[in-house]
Image: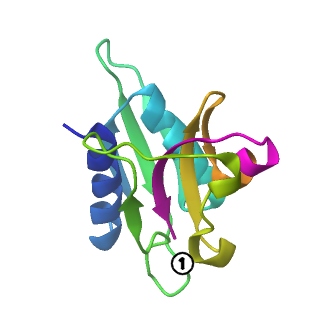
Amino acid sequence: MDTIGEFLTRVRNAGLARHEKVDVPSSKVRVGIAGVLKQGGYIRDFKVVKDGKQGMMRIYLRYLEDGRHAITTVDRASRPGRRLYVACDAIPKVRSGFGIAVLSTSKGIMSDKMATEQRLGGELVCTLW
């Protein structure tokens, strides 16, 4: 079961349905991805609520002035059946720098720009714009 793919699908579908927020189960990887999305300006905010079990994360979606969702396309690059690792020199430029790539590195989840600045490679989780 691809939990990261499910997380990205929930965010994409909630944006297409024009929801203000979406609730997803929380994990350290999902919190890291949500942090990268917030830093990139693709979501407004997120918060994690502890419930004694896994915890829930509420993501507040961001929309543009014309009402479109800030996330146009999400592509899951590395998946459980085929992991995709990239070196720091081979990190793809998404839409000529207008999109972001999310990487899982030895220093945590980070965007392509941060990984390039720190000269880190890792697993290419997804790309979005």
> Residue at point 40% right, 27% down?
27
- State which quadrant residue 25 falls in: top left
Q: Residue furthest right?
A: 117
**Label 1 neighbourhood size at 10 Å, few (<14), some (14-19), many (20+)?**
few
Q: Residue furthest top?
A: 52
Left or right, 39 with respect to 57, comes to right
Question: Where is mark 1, residue-wise?
Answer: 64
Q: Identify the amino acid type marked 1.
A: Leu
Q: Residue furthest left?
A: 1
Q: Is residue 30 above or below residue 42?
A: above
State the residue in front, 44 or 114: 114
SS at circle 1: loop
Query: Does the magenta portion include 103?
Result: no
Expressed as whole percent of the image width and height from the top left, the position of residue 46 reads 50, 43
State the residue in front, 20 or 100: 100
> Residue at point 46% right, 69% down?
71
Expressed as whole percent of the image width and height from the top left, the position of residue 104 reads 54, 38
Q: Is residue 53 above or below residue 129?
A: above
Expressed as whole percent of the image width and height from the top left, the position of residue 81 reads 25, 42
Left or right, 91 with respect to 129, comes to right
- State which quadrant residue 51 falls in: top left
Query: Does the magenta portion include 117?
Result: yes
Q: Which residues are magenta?
A: 115-129
State the residue in front, 115 or 60: 115
> Residue at point 70% right, 54% down?
89
Expressed as whole percent of the image width and height from the top left, the position of residue 36 reads 59, 48
Left or right, 81 with respect to 127, comes to left
Q: Is residue 32 above or below residue 17?
A: above
Q: Is residue 96 above or below residue 106?
A: below
